[in-house]
Structures are given as structure tokens and as C-alpha cells.
Image (cartoon, rainbow, N blue to C red):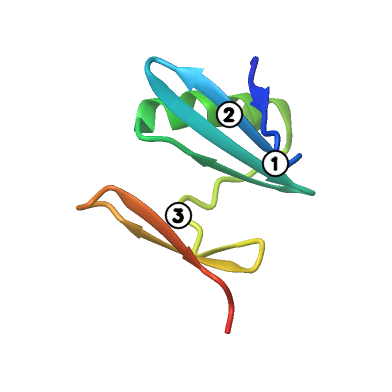
Amino acid sequence: MESLGSETDPGLFIKNMEDDNVYILVYLDDTFIAAKSKNNVKSVKAIPMTTFDARDIKDPSYILGWETMRDRATRTLNSATPR
């Protein structure tokens, strides 16, 4: 899987698939994958799931201490710092 590393975050990788960017955020043993296309997320997610002993927690409510809020109706993903 070829992807480009982010210039601003060494743990962020961006893969272009079918006119869609797939964002892969890796920190220690946590990985967060986001894209507009659910199929692109599934295909990228399948690689580590079949290679490593991994589990899918589906929609995380927190990642790296940040609260994540997903609104499927508006197709948005927001985050908030802990208080």
C-alpha cells in the first residue's frame, strides 16, 4: 500500500484512491482511518486486519485523548479536546 507521509505530522499518511483521500493516523498501537468512501476505508483497513492481530472498534468515541463526534447525516467528523 503506497501512501504519502504528511509534512506536518509523522504519524499521518494520506493515500489517494478513486478521487478520494484516505487518511491513516498511526500512534503507537492505535490506527484511525477516515475517508469519504466507506469502501475505501474497508479496503485500507483490511491490510492490517489480515496482517496483524488487530481488532476493529468501529466508531471510536475517543482517539489519542480527543473526543470524536460523527454525524452520518451531514457526513462530518469533528473532534474536541478534553476539558
Can you tell which mark lies on residue 8?
1
Amino acid identity at mark 3? Asp
**Residue 8 picture location, percent across and down:** 70, 41
- At 65% from the left edge and 15% from the top edge, which residue is drawn? 2
Can you tell which mark lies on residue 14?
2
Badge 2, how many Cα within 10 Å: few under 14, some, many 20+? some
Amino acid identity at mark 1? Thr
Label 3 vs 2, first from the N-terminus: 2
Residue 41 higher or lower than 3, as above or below: below
- The foreground one among 19 and 50 is 19
- At 60% from the left edge and 36% from the top edge, which residue is drawn? 24
Label 3 secondary element = loop
Amino acid identity at mark 2? Ile
Label 3 vs 1, first from the N-terminus: 1
User: What residue is shown with label 3?
Assistant: 59
- At 39% from the left edge and 15% from the top edge, which residue is drawn? 18
Q: How far is mark 3 from mark 1, CA to CA?
A: 25 Å
